[in-house]
Image (spheres, grey):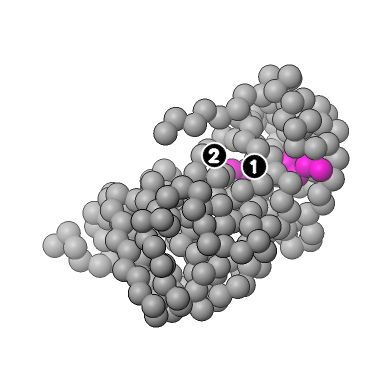
Amino acid sequence: MTDRLLKRYSYSITANDFMSAGKGSSAIKSNLKSLGIDANIIRRIAIISYETEINIVIHSFGGKLHCDIYENKIVIISEDTGPGIKDVDMAMTEGFSTATDSVRELGFGAGMGLPNIKKYSDRLEINTGSTGTLIIATIDL
Amino acid sequence: MIIEEIADIVKADVLTNYHKGNTELKYGFASDLMSDVLAYACSEALLITGLNNPQVIRTAEMLDINAVLFVRGKRPCDEVIELAKENSITILATEYTMFNTCGLLVLNGMKGLEIDD
């Protein structure tokens, strides 16, 4: 019963579109606010979804960001097409980054994306291969 | 520290102001790395940065940070100001470098954030 999906918000994310990056996470945040979710939980979800959204923009050919609401948890799912993460263990290490200088000039690519996502999630699943990456981050309510 | 005091101390222009009255900003957090801001900052902090792209405002929005101080004479473009207005974020801009800005604010009593994990 507790695993019944109550609502799903989905957004398309375009690769290399740094002006729009964050719009999906912004929409997720306002939707969660309107549902009356606790502010601390919303902040954690916003950080997770924003970091995943930025990752799609930086590293993939484009993808989707979903926010699934259940009675007892909220799940942020990021699915992209792209080259995948070559070394997940390295990518989880704070400070390790494969981002380009132009991405760094925008304030990202400091190697904190996946570590941040892990830090704010209760559970994190990463499935990656040569055609894309699926990230499932769960926050318990 | 209230916005007017901050603006006075670092000779900043107030470009948008949603801090009416005596709303205190308890802490300062300075970084040009938005992922570090996401990792360590909290909603009660003034975000001090030399970056001036829309992602600064998006980062503030995600953390419920409601005041951003741009340093080194960086002037946010109209798009950044509009995004700040949409999110009721106060924006200040100073000519001082980040180091001098932080130094002046600390000398006048602003605290830094402790990184606890």
> Horizontal placement of A115 versus B93: left or right?
left
User: Label 1: which residue?
Assistant: B31
The structure residue drawn at horizontal position 81% and vertical position 43%, both measured from the top left corner, is B72
Viewer-nearest residue: B9 or A7: B9
Please provide percent x and percent y for residue B26.
Answer: 60, 27
Q: Is residue B37 above or below residue A87?
A: above
Residue B41's disc number: 2
What segment carries the magenta color?
Answer: B65-72
Residue B56, how many percent across, how many down? 65, 52
* Residue A21 pos. (x, y %): 58, 66
Q: Is residue B84 above or below residue B45?
A: below
Instruction: State which quadrant residue B78 falls in.
Output: bottom right
**Disc on the earlier residue, 1 or 2:** 1
Chain bearing tag 1 is: B
Left or right: B103 in relation to A58: right
- The answer to whether residue B91 is seen in the rendering is no
Question: Residue drawn at (64%, 32%), measured in percent from left and top?
Answer: B28
Q: Label 2 neighbourhood size at 10 Å, few (<14), some (14-19), many (20+)?
A: many
- Closest to the observer, A88 or B49: A88
- Mark 1 residue element: loop
- Check disc 2 and report its element: helix, strand or loop: loop
- Residue type, mark 2 in image: Ala
Q: Amino acid at mark 1?
A: Ser
Q: In the figure, A119 relative to A133: above or below?
A: above
Which residue is found at the position 53% from the left and 62% from the top? A98
The image quarter containing residue B13 is top right
